[in-house]
Structures are given as structure tokens and as C-alpha cells.
Image (spheres, grey):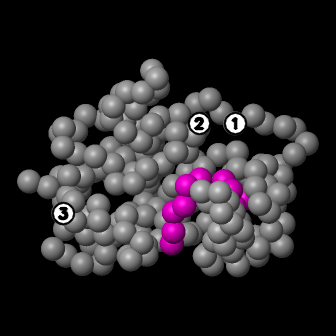
Amino acid sequence: MHQYFIIYKPYLVLSQFTSQLNKQTLADFFKVPKDVYPVGRLDEDSEGLLILTNDAQLNYRLLSPAFAHEREYWVQVDGAVTQQALALLQKGVDINVNGKLYKTKKCTVSALDENIIIPQRNPPIRVRKNIPAPWIRLILTEGKNRQVRKMTAKVGYPTLRLIRYRIEGLTLNNMQPGEMISLSKNEIYQKLFGTVT
């Protein structure tokens, strides 16, 4: 029987269930059957939406480069980000991937409304009184290792906080770090691929 969950992975938690070097893992927050695993990953210092399932077909469709799908990230950056920097990100920038230069694909980039509601992070980011830390939205269709952080650093604005908010039609909505929601196969396939199984 296939099972499907979406979770809000907290900050400083590994995207796996087995312990490593006394670091926190998904097992510290989420109780799921032993054959259920995360689809893809989020870095330890990133947070947000992660899918857990034992459906190998879903795993394949989301991880294979043959099937591009949107992932939306909310990114808090260090400094008053300019329109020029946003335009560069949108066109694609050169980043280092496995020791080689790689030009990121075109993506959608915009400033996020200052009044967005985002859960507190524990511990919070360091705040510097005289330097703004605005939020931007990046919508990518690829997922290289630490891509978002490399992209914002490339245009001069290091990432302070990174939340994956959406994968296709699945969103965090009002979820809080450490929360989990169970979905049916129809619900998750409809939101991810627009199809009912």
C-alpha cells in the first residue's frame, strides 16, 4: 500500500531517517512506516517542503531530469537586493557544480511582499541593524546541489535563510516546522502532475 506525506522539514535537520554524527534527523520529528523515505532532499541548513513516500514511481518522476517540475523557494538574502541582481538570476548565472562551471536554467525571480507570514526559525538568523535582509522568490525547474545559495552568492547577496515553499501544486501553506500531513495518492498526483490515478 503506497503512502504519501508532506512535511515541513525544520532547520538543522538531516533529510534522512538514520542518525549520523549525533545530528537531528527526520526520525526525531516524524513517525512513518519503515519503507517510507524522502523524495529528494533539502540541505541540513535549509527548511521547508519535503515529500515522504514508498511509491517508487512518484520518486522516479520527481527525481528524473527527464521530467522538469517547478520548485519554489523563499530566500532571505543579505543586503538590499537590486532589480539588476534579480534580472541576472532570472537569466541564469554560472555556478560551480562538481568542479565545473554550470549555467543555471532561466527561472522566475521576484521580490516577496514584506508582510509574508513565515514561521520563526530556531535559532533565528543574525540581524544587522543597518543591513536589510529582504525575501525573494525563486522558481526553479532544476535542482543542483546547493543551487539557490550558489546563485544568490554569485550576484552578491548571500543566502541567510532558505525555505522550499512549493513543489508544483503542493505548498507548505500554513504548515509549521515539524508538521506532517498525510495525502491520498489521488491528491498528491493531482497536485504534482495534474492527473488522477
At 65% from the left edge and 69% from the top edge, which residue is drawn?
102
Q: In terms of sequence position, does the residue under pointer 1 or pointer 3 come before the other?
A: 1
Question: Can residue 109 be seen here?
Answer: no
> Left or right of 14: which side holds 59?
left
Mark 1 closeness class: few <14, some 14–19, many ≥20 residues within 10 Å: few
On the image, the x and y values in percent for residue 188 come to: 27, 64
From what the image shows, is residue 102 above or below residue 39?
below
Q: Is residue 48 or residue 174 the one in the foreground?
A: 48
Quadrant the N terminus occupies: bottom left
Residue 121's disc number: 2
Q: How many marks?
A: 3
Q: Amino acid at mark 1?
A: Ile
> Left or right of 92: which side holds 132?
right
Query: Disc 3 on helix, strand or loop?
Result: helix
On the image, the x and y values in percent for residue 175 come to: 42, 47
On the image, the x and y values in percent for residue 160 come to: 70, 45
Q: Is residue 96 or residue 168 the one in the foreground?
A: 96
From what the image shows, is residue 91 above or below residue 21?
below
Query: Disc 1 on helix, strand or loop?
Result: loop
For label 1, the residue is 125
Instruction: Give the extent of the magenta segment.
Output: 141-152
For label 3, the residue is 185
- Determine contact: label 2, label 1, CB under 8 Å: yes
> Left or right of 108: which side holds 41?
left
